[in-house]
Image (cartoon, rainbow, N blue to C red):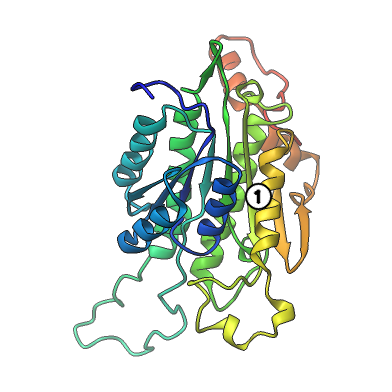
Amino acid sequence: MPPNTPSPTPVALITGGASGIGLHIAEHLVQRGWNVTIVDYDDVGGKKAAERLGSQTFFAQADVSDYDQQAAAFAKTWERWARLDFVVANAGVADTTNFYTQEAEPREDGAPPPRPNTAVLDIGLMGVVYSAYLGLHYFRRNKEEGKIRGGKIVATASMCGLYAAAGMPGYTAAKHGVVGLTRALGGWFGGKGKGRGEGVTVNCICPGLVDTSLTAGTLVEVADERHVTPMSTIVRAVEGFLEDGEKNGLVAECSVGNIHYREQMEYGDEEARWLMTADWEEMLRAKMAGDGEVEANSSAET
């Protein structure tokens, strides 16, 4: 295929694609005939996965918490296939800092405790933010008969993005952030949002306990099998988002064999609804133009 000629085959980029959920999604897409870029920090595992999946798969090593490294992986994908249709923002790690075991007594030098390890947020939240940001850039470069074709994003959150896990505060914070990002972007690109004409969808999955490297040797080892969510449920949820262009800003809770689409909580009152759906850009523009107070127009699906 000549340079800069878009691939006739759809292209996906999957972070954290060398193992676990990301690898299963990659396998599913390759079986469907997709081209797939696997992005992962694990250089050995990533190369092995790409080699096993065949010529439709390309591996780009990157630390997704580093914007420049992740941007380079997206750029290599575009250089290879000149299109990008689907981004799975999946990379994540577990908590490594225990909030509850700090010593009560001050250190001898009087200093505060050492800085906590924030990798769970840097990778699990900021890495997803970067993936979405870069994905939107390349979606806008997708052209078909002169028109922007858009693309789809699915982020991997967790049930910890819906419920608070007291033993994993950092992980809970990261996954709540992913759910919030999904709903905000989905509100912009779907329904009555300002970006609804761009052909972009943003959704996320919130799996329960899944047998991956993240849970190996911990919960999966002690949990009853009936509490473990199979990969087939995860893949089915992702496939549902991939096939339905009307789903936007949705959160799919994946629990064992069930998929529950979880709505945003109801507004407490009409003042809260107004505040969260107001078109602030338009109101400020009108204010600067001297139009006086204007009624807020919804900028997102409510």
Front-most of 9 and 195? 9
Nearest the viewer among 115 and 191 is: 191
Does 144 sit left or right of 19 as displayed?
right
Q: Residue 69 at x, y = what percent?
A: 30, 46
Q: Residue at x 53, y 31 (%)?
A: 9
- The answer to whether residue 118 of the structure is visible from this angle is yes
The amino acid at mark 1 is Val
Q: Position of residue 132 (x, y in %)?
A: 49, 40
The image quadrant of residue 189 is top right
The residue drawn where x is 53% and y is 76% is: 215
Q: Nearer the viewer, residue 26 or 279?
A: 26
**Residue 110 higher or lower than 297, as above or below:** below
**Mark 1: few, some, or many residues within 10 Å (few <14, many ≥20)?**
many
Q: Relative to 47, is 148 on the left or the right?
A: right
Residue 109's spot in the image, x, y percent? 19, 83
User: Percent from the top left, x then y, of residue 94?
Assistant: 47, 70
Residue 92 located left or right of residue 64: right
Q: Which residue is mark 1?
A: 238
